[in-house]
Amino acid sequence: MRLKSLAENEITRIIVEQACKEWMDVSRTDVVIVGAGPSGMTAAKYLAERGVKVVLFERRLSFGGGIGGGGMLFHKVVLGEPADEILREVGCKPTPVGEGIYVVDAAEMIARLASGAIDAGAKIIMGVTVDDVIYRENPLRIEGVCIQWSAVQIAGLHVDPIFVRSKAVIDATGHDAEVITVASRKVPGLSLALKGERSAYSELSEQLVVERTGKIVEGLYATGMAVAAVEGLPRMGPIFGSMLLSGRKVAEIVEGDLRGK
Ligand code: 48H
């Protein structure tokens, strides 16, 4: 076997040319999703499947958010029906462990949710942190995000971000609701006050997170644990059904709003 290879400069040229071409396209999109945890990847899949142009930015160089840690590093997560439907759609085989309750390997769930989103046509870019929003007035609304290489942020360098304009931004950043937090601080006219996540009350929390998933202000939406941070809801621990159902629900709401525009 003779393995085909390339001169170093050609490797560079291909990477830079292809990445830059894509960044030109990414700079204006229908929906920006922030965070590749369970809710963000689920939302990406359902939006992309409906023909919406989706870019998902993830701070880390890996997918999955809190899935990978399972429950206290035990490699399993639990979920209740009907969230198992979503896992089956992406090719997971959740194991039944009780009436309507399932368990799944963390690694399997991460891999399948990510490929579900990518296969549907969502673009996932890792190593990018969203550190601010773009807003417009009359009417006051969110119209995109400011982005920075995570490596630049970690190094503490003073480098200005670049921008991505979008019709909708979904905060799927988990416990800290980072996008909504920055919008509440830096766009005071939005009058956004985060209530803060509460202590554990799993059965109640899962239901409420799904119920309260949706639009926060014009152009800005919350899914997953970000909903708990905004709405003052209790946490639920490593049971993930509500993260998946919240991701699917926010996709439906955003798609409906985009169609209405
Ligand atoms: C780019 C960012 C930024 C940023 C964060 O934490 P996640 O898994 O989020 P959810 O809400 O989909 O799922 C929550 C679940 O994992 C969990 O923690 C549960 C159910 N906890 C219950 C409990 O009681 O503790 O994923 C968020 C992702 C992560 O990958 C972050 O790296 C990423 O978002 N992220 N990416 N720019 N500013 N902030």
Image: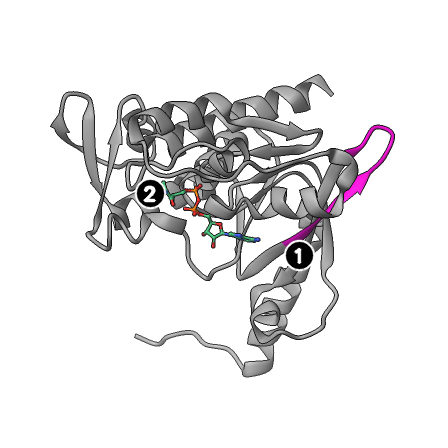
Mark 1 CB near ligand 1 (8 Å cut) = yes
- Looking at the image, residue 157 sits to the left or right of residue 222; the answer is right
Measuring from the top left, give residue 226's x and y in whole percent: 50, 39
Label 2 or label 1, whichever lies nearer to me, is: 1
Relative to 128, is 81 above or below?
Answer: above
- Quadrant position of the C terminus in the picture: top right
Closer to the camera, 126 or 49? 126
| Snapshot quadrant of residue 84 | top left
Helix or strand or loop: what does disc 1 sit on? strand
Relative to 1, is 231 above or below?
Answer: above
Does the magenta portion include 135? yes
Name the residue at 74% across, 39% down: 143
| Snapshot quadrant of residue 5 | bottom left
Residue type, mark 1 in image: Ile
- Which residue bears the numbered disc 1? 147
Q: Is residue 28 visible?
A: no
Which residues, given as a range, are shown in magenta?
A: 131-141
In this view, the residue farthest toward the top is 260
Mark 2 CB near ligand 1 (8 Å cut) = no
Closer to the camera, 119 or 161? 161
In this view, the residue farthest toward the left is 97
Does the magenta portion include 213? no
